[in-house]
Image (cartoon, rainbow, N blue to C red):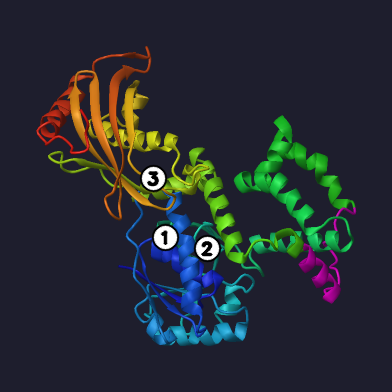
Amino acid sequence: MKTAAIIGGGVIGGGWAARFLINGWDVVISDPDPEAERKISEVLANARRSLPALSDVAIPKEGKLSFASSIKDCVQDADWIQESVPERLDIKHKVFAEIQKHCRVDALIGSSTSGFKPSELQQGAARPDLIFVAHPFNPVYLLPVIELVGVHTTLEKAAAVLDTLGMKPLIVRKEIDAHIADRLLEAVWREALWLIKDGICTTEELDDAIRFGFGLRWAQMGMFETYRIAGGEAGMRHFMAQFGPCLEWPWTKLMDVPEFNDELVDLIAGQSDAQSGKYSIRELERIRDDNLVSMMRALKARNWGAGALLNQHDARNRPSLPDSIAAPLRTLERVVPIDWTDYNGHMNESRYGQVFSDAGDVVMAMIGADQAYIDGGMSYFTVDNHITYNNETHAGEAVYVRTQVLEAKGKKLRMYHEFCRVSDDELLATCNQLLVHVSLETRRSCEPGPEMAAKMAVLHEAQTRLPRPASMRD
């Protein structure tokens, strides 16, 4: 079991802890704040509800969480150490010195700093090459990108670890204050302050310009790919020629900053309270997380951007096909995502069909009807589904499907699925499913080839010897 040490248990440190823990790492946290355990538990509650919902396969078993009273006890067995203390260089230097005094000589030490360069962090360190910037975005347990800055050989090792956590390591080519993303955010922030100070818009109106407009484009294509489309068929070169002269126009106040005084603070804070004051911070976190999960799952269906990364992570975690066919088959295990629920607060009936379809796909793969087979022009179509709903299913619940093959002969593949809750094995729904082998060229049923027929015969013989499922009706 891998161990991560988290130094600093605030919002970012707690997010790191959740990301490691839910991906199967043991986590040890050191934070002098007497409220640290409570704060961490609240972050973990949000993470446990949202992060597993991004996956369409079973996630690793959660690691063990513990708290250490000292940095020494926290880091001594750690493979990865993540520093998330306040943004003061003197504090960080003291923390790194204490860490490297007690940690393993090969331990990776990432800093969540949003502004300092690695050369600044490494000053006076015993093993400077192992200290690097690993700058995340809140919530760390959901947003995948991590800006990595430091010694290349160390960053390669760090990137390999982050890959296993379902994250997107972004290696910054040269060190610079505030790295990449925060420099962009700082530019937007400065301009936003001017727009509000000058009475052009309110905080809510400015946010609307982002969330109803370019923010949606940026979330799935970023800046330059978006602008490439804006250039039309001629692409980016045309866009640059058309809009390049705008750089010389006085559209921005980025070269200047408004005076940061009580008047500006009161203006921003007052408008923000009017905009969002009806929600608590915890409520806003839940809203944010649910929306992020839904948006990222939409990108996942298109295999694009952050969604493509999620699909790659699922592929790494996807279990192998069932080994034994002499027992009911465990064909699916996953967590119910928030976007599967409806206005009644439980899983929508259409998603039961998806669950049983996914379970049937596993049986298809067992007899050779995998993606390569489908690409070759043959597949199975569903011709009959009979679903019985036994109990409610809610977002965040871990569920599984137990499948028994009732018939695997000729064109027919008939299965009986039992959909259950992991925590108590409660039966949630059943499905009697009939598939028929088809040619994708003619779109008509046809007999499978001899190789598949032989696999079907073996599966049929083993599964039809099993007792009839207790939940199966006449």
Q: Nearer the viewer, residue 9 or 179?
A: 9
Q: Nearer the viewer, residue 232 or 457?
A: 457
> What element does badge 1 sit on?
helix
Give the magenta part as a residue range.
Answer: 250-271
Residue 334 in percent (x, y) is at: 36, 48
Q: Secondary structure at mark 2?
A: loop
Which disc number belongs to residue 140? 2
Q: Residues within 10 Å of mark 3 (few under 14, many from 20)?
A: few
Q: Is residue 405 magenta?
A: no
Front residue of 235/21: it is 21
Q: Earlier in the sequence, mark 2 or mark 3?
A: 2
- Residue that label 1 marks: 160
Q: Amino acid at mark 3?
A: Glu
Which residue is pictured at 77% across the width and 42% down the height? 240
Q: CA distance from mark 3 to mark 1?
A: 40 Å
Q: Helix, strand, or loop for circle 3? A: loop
Cα separation between marks 2 and 1:
17 Å
Q: Nearer the viewer, mark 3 or mark 1?
A: 3
